[in-house]
Amino acid sequence: MKILRYPEPQDLANGLVRPESDTAVIQSQVAEIFEAVRKDGDAALLRYTEKFDSISLKKIVPSKDEIAAQAKLCPVELQKAITQAKQNIEKFHLAQEETFSPIETMPGVLLWRRSTPIEKVGLYVPGGTAPLFSTVLMLAIPAQLAGCSEITLCTPPQKNGLVHPAVAFAAQLCGAPKIACVGGAQAIAAMVFGTESISKALKVFGPGNVYVTAAKELANEYGVAADLPAGASELAVLADGTANPVFIAADILSQAEHGTDSHTMFVTTSEALADRVQAEISKQIGALPRKEIVKAALDKSVVVIVKTLNDAIMAVNTYAPEHLSIDVKDPSAVLESISNAGSVFVGSYSPEAAGDYASGTNHTLPTGGWAAMTGGISLESFMKKITFQKITKEGLQSLGHTIITMAEAEGLKGHAQAIRVRM
Amino acid sequence: MKILRYPEPQDLANGLVRPESDTAVIQSQVAEIFEAVRKDGDAALLRYTEKFDSISLKKIVPSKDEIAAQAKLCPVELQKAITQAKQNIEKFHLAQEETFSPIETMPGVLLWRRSTPIEKVGLYVPGGTAPLFSTVLMLAIPAQLAGCSEITLCTPPQKNGLVHPAVAFAAQLCGAPKIACVGGAQAIAAMVFGTESISKALKVFGPGNVYVTAAKELANEYGVAADLPAGASELAVLADGTANPVFIAADILSQAEHGTDSHTMFVTTSEALADRVQAEISKQIGALPRKEIVKAALDKSVVVIVKTLNDAIMAVNTYAPEHLSIDVKDPSAVLESISNAGSVFVGSYSPEAAGDYASGTNHTLPTGGWAAMTGGISLESFMKKITFQKITKEGLQSLGHTIITMAEAEGLKGHAQAIRVRM
């Protein structure tokens, strides 16, 4: 890990720059995949699955029975854990439901709004080294709660061509969306255009590698919305001298094992803690099977030593991390000042891993600094808010003159006329 | 207006396709403007203002005194109207504030979320044939209420090089954001990169022509968020035989006067009403100064005659209009079934023009079918929601096993380890 000692603001900003990937090549490859899927539909999907995943499939969408058979292979212990996680995620996302009471802005001018589900949504669940069944929960639960009527879930198949048991189990538990065995940019393309076996979606969701991220960006140009730019994972840890270095080291390592492009930033007011955390990292790293990934990620990560908690807060807000762990003597004061972060973990017993899986918050969060502008996935991500107004004849009498005056000043006589004919 | 009589679903979908503009040329022009602004800053802005607006400016940001002097030129009658509109818009947007009570998903597992302002925002207010001071209200009021700490407003100058009096007045009334005299794609570029006189924004907002829309899309690639694709304006009117043709004709005309690319769709169960509305349009059109624009817009617009209210609702949901006027005998049943629309106007005395200016709803709304996926601008557009969790030692004891089981099944030992060190 790089170390920044008492940096000036500009050095801090430079030191916190995330590693970049070359997107131009990726974009042109993804555009090619989009064109092929648009033209050839399922045939293109089968071709790409053979090419990128080295799996030769006969069909893309397994039958309900096939999914059920796979789900049964999920170990009972894991079934229990997934069920527990589902309950917590459901509770927190249900609590996000908006109740909006109509208000009168003037007598006779009644306004309200209503959250309405996005009808057709497409969920992407990455496979890779291990199938991320936790992402099934994080996407399918809010989609189901929102009331989306058509939910398609794309995920790369296992080497044997079948859906991973835990993915099948989690999907069934969340109301069994239609599962399609396809991954990567071609999966996003399938949900953007629709194919013989996959429905066109209005909005696509889910994390993924740089190809998936580029594909979600491209989706926009075809009139399909995308959730948020979810790139390489990030963690910032903010701690003072009271924090436990063993816990912090474990959290940093857990973040680093996501991928070589994972990024962590550890900011502290205690030089002694910084030393102890680094010693602990060296000690704990030996136990991890993904050591090489962890080391590569740590090489690009950074320790920032600052004079005051205020400096630490400024560093975190500048970085705008996806995840933020706070372990200080008095967290409430620090919490108040955090303005840029995706999800925050407060105190020694709130490890970031809890939010990845089971405490109830969503783990699909903004990365790459986007936490300064947007939150993570929530119930609202699967809905849109429609505004309504009902004005009475008397209400329009009171408001009409204002509207006419403004419309005419903007040179829009027709707008004024629409009021006059009613007055 | 085109007429579709009792169309089959596919004919309906084809008939409701919006006119398209050629975006490829526009995108490359906008990319060129971005490059110039990034390189030359203010100098490029002054150059483009000379080139596109034929105005030679000495500086881009007028002083506070200059703004105040312009604001004083706003007629008193219009000042009153703007002030009234501001009160209503403020009330409705204030009512959108979220209060989220922390919840325990399990004993000792406390979760909550907090809406936090986006620190630096850029607002775009189009000029064109008339300066849209109403857009100042629609953007600056929620930005102010959200608590954004840096608000920049870009708007093209008048021919005399000064800010329009009504724009200056509205801006002052809304807490006086910093006003910059620059329009078009170059204004968006300035807010994306920052220049000597304009601050870099984290998110840009506002309607505009195809260049501005393309510029907002491009903003994303530079890590700056954009509000929503707000293209050519649209209105759908859904009415049965009880509706007043004079009112409907006036509403359709008011929509059509926005621009030649405005689009309206009128769906009704009453063939007689369809005839009367068209007759009324011919009658009322004569009084409008923007006749030629209106005619061009109406040429591309469509009347749909259907058998039942359900068919009418289906047509509207397929179209997903920016604005929807509903004038039927029993609106409540229809309202329930509307799933895709930006803002809805209910009953004979709720003209769409009321929402454009003064009733309190926001007029920056999704167009081009995006109302199926996203709502219009709201207080939340200027904020992001950060999730938080605080788990007690006992809470983690109960939840820990679930997390460990899931993490190990995903092959993430480091995540399991981060729990184990705490248990």
Image (cartoon, coloured by chain):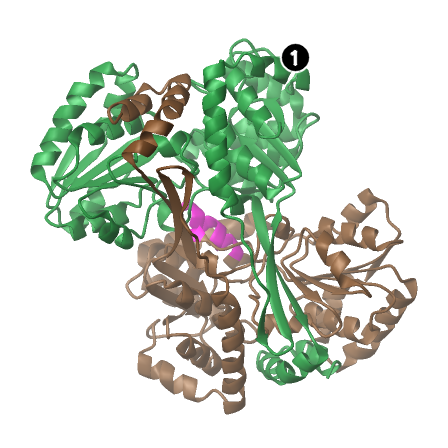
Chain colours: A brown, B green
Describe the element under mark 1 as helix, strand or loop: loop
- Left or right side of B318 for B9: left
Q: Point out residue A127 in the picture as x, y percentages from the top left corner.
A: 51, 72
Query: Chain for mark 1?
Result: B
Label 1, on which residue? B58
Q: Point out residue A18 in the picture as x, y percentages from the top left corner.
A: 70, 53
Question: Compared to A416, does A89 lie above or below?
Answer: below
Question: Compared to A304, does A133 lie above or below?
Answer: below
Q: Quadrant of residue A143?
A: bottom left
Residue at the outermost left position: B272
- State yes or no: residue A216 in magenta: yes
Question: Identity of the amino acid at label 1?
Answer: Lys
Question: Compared to B370, does B33 lie above or below?
Answer: above
Q: Which residues are magenta?
A: A213-225
**Residue B60 in view here:** yes
- Name the residue at 61% across, 18% down: B46
Q: Nearer the viewer, residue A418 or A191?
A: A418
Q: Point out residue B183 in the picture as x, y percentages from the top left corner.
A: 53, 23
Q: Quadrant of the N terminus of chain B?
A: top left
Q: Quadrant of the C terminus of chain B?
A: bottom right
Q: Nearer the viewer, residue A27 or B117?
A: B117
Q: Nearer the viewer, residue B356 or B47?
A: B356
- Name the residue at 62% across, 45% down: B118
Query: Tag count in the figure?
Result: 1
